[in-house]
Amino acid sequence: MSETKPFIALVDFGSQYTHLIARRLKDLGVDTRFFKPTQPPPKTSRLRGIILSGGPNSVIKNPLPFNKSWLTSTQPLLGLCYGHQLIARQFKGQVTPGQIREYGPARLTINQLHPLTAQIKKHSTVWMSHGDSVTKLPPGFINLGSTATLPHAALAHRSKPIFGLQFHPEVHHTVYGQILLKNFCFNICGLKPHKPTDQLTKIQAAVLQQVGNKKVFLLVSGGVDSTVALIILVKTLGPKRVYALHIDTGLLRQNESRLVGQSLKKLGYRRWQTNKAGALFLKNLAGITDPERKRQIIGQTFLQVAKLATKRLKLNTKDWLLGQGTIYPDTIESGGTKHADKIKTHHNRIGLLQRLAQDNLLVEPLKELYKDEVRRLGQTLGLPQELLWGHPFPGPGLGVRLLCLNKRQANQLNQSVKQLNLKNIPHLILPINSVGVQGDERSYARPLAVDAPYSSFAYWHKQATKLTNQHKLINRVLLKLTGPSLTLIKAYSSFITKQRIKLLQQCDALVTQELKAAGLYYKIWQCPVVLIPIGFRHQESLVIRPFTSREAMTGQAYHLPEPVIKTLAKRLTKLKKLDYIFYDLTDKPPGTVEWE
């Protein structure tokens, strides 16, 4: 950010979306600076407005300490989610714990014309992620908007430039979110947009400053992030100062390492090698069931293999820095800011790598970017479309798509199988857990399976939001595609093995083939397939998770055409190794894209 340009202060209370606010303002041509809640507002005429972010805490039960000067500043103030509740509470309004949580879309009604809500239709969709809510306006405030469950979803002071929004305008699922932010910056704060610095030029300058005369040893998965990082480093430092290592973990998709090699050769890059380390990853993951522990072990094993490779290549570690294609969602979901909740530790954000990053010894050209920004950058660099728009694949690979249980865990889950009060609808809360994100917090809860025809997708997609909001025990809703009565389901002890990896690779390949054959592969963001150790005969079942998003911070379950689903189910059933096939109907929030 320029030291002479005006800016908006972003006070970070730990929301998963705080950095996304800055991204949206950058798109508007507005500079931002991040501040901790306990810091005082900067004493500079360049400060033109303040935004208080959301966060995982409750202003009622466990409020974060903060500097009250943020609320008494003469600059315009906008509170989002937690910030909205904080403003209401501090100005003597009432905030009440919600009877139900609210995650996902809601219908906003604008109640009054105001410069903040200019050019916004009276009714529109907004994105919620909260538990507490404002139930009584503070003295001197007016109601700008409401939803069916929130009487005060948007508020404004009668005479001062102070505003609150319970929803998140920064996520693209809030239809008029960017207009709201634009109104705040330009109508309220009086800012004017400026042309942002060319992104590639800015990244290259940062790389040159960090690397100096050293070289970069880059871990390359072959996906869009690591490949874009590789091309930027080669373009900036020259090919002789960059060496790439692709690690075949044994947890990759079918034929993935071979395809990565072909891709790098097409790009004309020759200074790389593949290291086959599947046996080591399997050994280190033996008997592990906890998803967080899995991710940490995978990250540690990556570093172990990389260290062995540097010795074998006789690279002097004093001359080489480690490089990664980390993007910003990896950081924030790993609890990368002071008050953010850890949703799941990404393999590229384990403790040792965090320390390397803090010591400026880790080169990450894309660490401030989201996936859509990386893809645009890749287009600028001339990368092929099939690489740029391929489905994202998690660094831990199939290791986080193979859910595991030990015998004790399976027994406990089987003993606690429950049902909800869904009249005349066969259903079961499955004896397995998955990771979710609810109200900026990590959830580790159960999926609800519903035995209903696929033609009822639209109905159950809506119900998925309602049911996960109402019942803390569940964070996903699944539609049963194949299999007998749900009452036959039990959980079984199962770990990561070669046999399970091979089965999941086969399932993943079949799903990908069908999506491409139907012309749908590039229309959706991602389609994880998840193997879960529940069933009755084969003791394995599969979850298909088609998902659409823009930057992976929020997203929605994708509705595949029924003929495609029928073909998919038929081909997967022919494997004769699956008891049930389910379809994940859950948006994000409350469910993360991946199950672990």
Image (cartoon, rainbow, N blue to C red):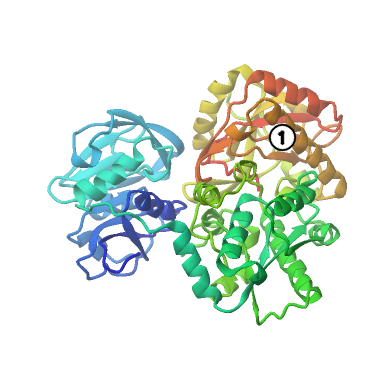
Residue 22: x and y, percent?
Answer: 38, 54
Residue topped by disc 1: 512
Binning the other alpha carbons within 10 Å of mark 1 as few (below 14), some (14 to 19) or many (20 upward) gives some
Residue found 30% across the figure and 69% down from its top: 3
| 403 relative to 564, above or below | below
Along the line of sight, the residue nearer the viewer: 312 or 434: 312
In the displayed structure image, the side of residue 99 where residue 319 appears, left or right: right
Residue found 81% across the figure and 53% down from its top: 250
In the displayed structure image, the side of residue 36 where residue 101 appears, left or right: right
In the displayed structure image, the side of residue 144 where residue 102 appears, left or right: right
Residue found 54% across the figure and 21% down from its top: 459
Along the line of sight, the residue nearer the viewer: 255 or 175: 255
In the image, farthest residue toward the left = 159
Quadrant in which the N terminus is drawn: bottom left
Q: Is residue 369 visible?
A: yes
Along the line of sight, the residue nearer the viewer: 128 or 43: 43
Residue 206: x and y, percent?
Answer: 48, 69
Residue 513: x and y, percent?
Answer: 74, 32
Marks counted in the figure total 1
> Mark 1 falls on what kind of element?
helix
Q: Quadrant of residue 96?
A: top left
Q: Quadrant of residue 34?
A: bottom left
- Residue type at mark 1 is Thr
Q: Is residue 163 visible?
A: no
